[in-house]
């Protein structure tokens, strides 16, 4: 099922929010995002990559220059002071609890970054799991069953290198008998792969920019900028802090992919920020605690609803984190996960021999850097668990859609996880609903 434009909530500008006394201060000191501090210096990372791939080093050294800019003692003192002030002065018990949960999460996020700067991998992992959780066992079982199907098809491949890689994976991942039975089946959820037109028109970065600006007008969103980025990144990036969307200069998108990404970036991330800030609870603009699972789940769901899909999103990120944290009983460091992913990407490739191997190495490197960012890369089991939210969130939103959950009727009111019963309870207690739908329901009763 889709989310129709007529069901989007109206702005509540001018209405006094229940957390007016706290939101601006929270936004000022707590709107930082952990991942923004975990990128490395380009030339240093490239040098580490060369040494790693040449096996001159066992694991790369991952640098985090942005962490040097964070004033940890002062930042934590500000967060703790705000928490204390709210708990002592906020009369509404629900608002008090909502901010307690969110500030606890931000304090943990800051301490996680501090652990990264200090090279304390296990402490970093502890905070990462507190914020983002651990891979869910049932979803891991489904993921590993998909991996097994891919491996089994390549065990007797006519290409000896492919067959050897598949056999190495089979020994490493399935040396011990493993229960891979899963109740998850994408077909039961209505996922449908749409046929692609190979000759479909492609849009340049300037055309993408214009389409994104038109989407802002469609959703009646003001105060956001769409910019062309000269960054080496190939991904479209939304900065919630700057209220800006960055389109890479060299970006090309087909018409279908462009429509899908507009729903992902503008129709989810930007829209929920704006609707949240104009609701009764402004904190919904920056998100309730642990909202990201629902946020990314909804964004990928809406993208798939436009583009089509035969599978839940986020398999590779979930798989890499599961490998690192030892869901199969073997905790792994950067090198160990890399070797598995390299073989995995190699047997999946349709490219010829040497080209396939080089592509597999580069893809495995990128995935491992993303998985182990924040750590030294050397400690088995320690990684950044954030990327599990994409797959687990995507499945949770498809489950709501499959069950025709009433929670879908207010899914755009702000940044919360509609599959989290505690979040639904908070919105119920504060009587936060989709005002447009409420008006339509009232008309139906007249």
Image: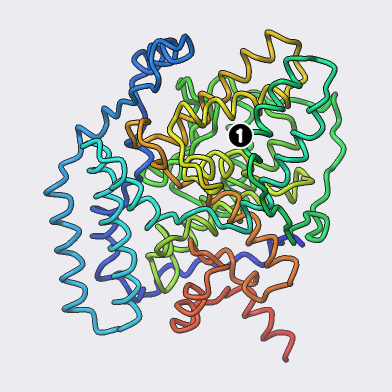
User: At x 50% / y 45%, what residue is drawn?
Assistant: 326
Q: x and y percent of residue 126 in the render?
A: 33, 52
Q: Is residue 374 left or right of residue 236?
A: left
Rendered view: 413 above or below 348: below
User: At x 79% / y 46%, what residue is drawn?
Assistant: 310
Q: Is residue 326 left or right of residue 92?
A: right
Tally of marks: 1
Q: x and y percent of residue 426 in the render?
A: 45, 77
Residue under pointer 1:
172
* Coloring applied to the structure: rainbow
Q: x and y percent of residue 287 in the render?
A: 42, 60
Asked where in the image residue 402 lies, by quadrant, the reply is bottom right
Rendered view: 445 above or below 275: below
Q: Is residue 201 left or right of residue 112?
A: right
339 vs 49, nearest the viewer: 339
Q: x and y percent of residue 169 in the render?
A: 65, 31
133 vs 278, nearest the viewer: 133
- Which quarter of the figure is the N terminus placed in? bottom right
132 vs 6, nearest the viewer: 132
Secondary structure of the residue carrying numbered label 1 = helix
Asked where in the image residue 166 lies, by quadrant, the reply is top right
User: At x 32% / y 36%, what residue is drawn?
Assistant: 37
Asked where in the image residue 410 lies, by quadrant, the reply is bottom right
* Residue placed furthest toward the front: 176
- Which quarter of the figure is the C terminus placed in? bottom right
427 vs 160, nearest the viewer: 160
User: At x 62% / y 44%, what residue is drawn?
Assistant: 314
């Amino acid at each position: 099922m889709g989310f129709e434009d007529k069901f989007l909530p109206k702005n509540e500008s001018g209405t006094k929010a229940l957390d007016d006394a706290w939101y601006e201060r929270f936004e000022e000191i707590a709107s930082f995002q952990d991942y923004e501090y975990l990128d490395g210096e380009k030339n240093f990372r490239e040098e580490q990559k060369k040494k790693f791939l040449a096996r001159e080093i066992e694991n790369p050294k991952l640098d985090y220059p942005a962490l040097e800019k964070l004033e940890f003692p002062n930042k934590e003192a500000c967060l703790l002071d705000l928490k204390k002030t709210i708990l002592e002065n906020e009369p509404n018990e629900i608002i008090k609890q909502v901010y307690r949960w969110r500030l606890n999460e931000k304090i943990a996020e800051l301490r996680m970054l501090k652990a990264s700067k200090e090279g304390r991998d296990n402490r970093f992992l502890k905070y990462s799991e507190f914020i983002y959780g651990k891979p869910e066992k049932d979803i891991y079982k489904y993921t590993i069953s998909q991996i097994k199907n891919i491996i089994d098809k390549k065990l007797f491949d006519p290409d000896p290198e492919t067959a050897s890689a598949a056999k190495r994976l089979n020994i490493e991942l399935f040396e011990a008998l493993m229960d891979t039975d899963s109740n998850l089946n994408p077909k039961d959820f209505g996922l449908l792969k749409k046929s692609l037109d190979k000759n479909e028109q492609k849009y340049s970065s300037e055309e993408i920019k214009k389409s994104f600006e038109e989407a802002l007008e469609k959703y009646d969103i003001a105060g956001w900028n769409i910019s062309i980025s000269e960054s080496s990144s190939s991904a479209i990036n939304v900065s919630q802090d700057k209220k800006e969307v960055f389109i890479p200069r060299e970006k090309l998108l087909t018409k279908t992919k462009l429509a899908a990404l507009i729903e992902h970036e503008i129709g989810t991330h930007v829209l929920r920020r704006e609707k949240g800030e104009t609701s009764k609870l402004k904190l919904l603009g920056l998100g309730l605690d642990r909202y990201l699972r629902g946020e990314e789940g909804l964004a990928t769901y809406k993208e798939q609803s436009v583009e089509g899909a035969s599978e839940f999103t986020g398999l590779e990120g979930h798989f890499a984190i599961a490998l690192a944290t030892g869901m199969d009983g073997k905790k792994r460091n950067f090198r160990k996960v890399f070797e598995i992913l390299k073989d995995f990407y190699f047997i999946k490739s349709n490219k010829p021999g040497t080209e396939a191997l080089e592509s597999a190495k580069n893809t495995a490197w990128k995935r491992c850097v993303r998985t182990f960012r924040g750590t030294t890369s050397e400690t088995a089991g320690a990684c950044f668990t954030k990327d599990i939210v994409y797959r687990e969130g995507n499945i949770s939103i498809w489950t709501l859609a499959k069950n025709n959950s009433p929670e879908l009727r207010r899914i755009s009111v702000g940044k919360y996880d509609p599959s989290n019963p505690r979040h639904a309870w908070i919105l119920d207690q504060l009587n936060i609903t989709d005002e447009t739908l409420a008006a339509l329901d009232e008309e139906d009763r007249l």
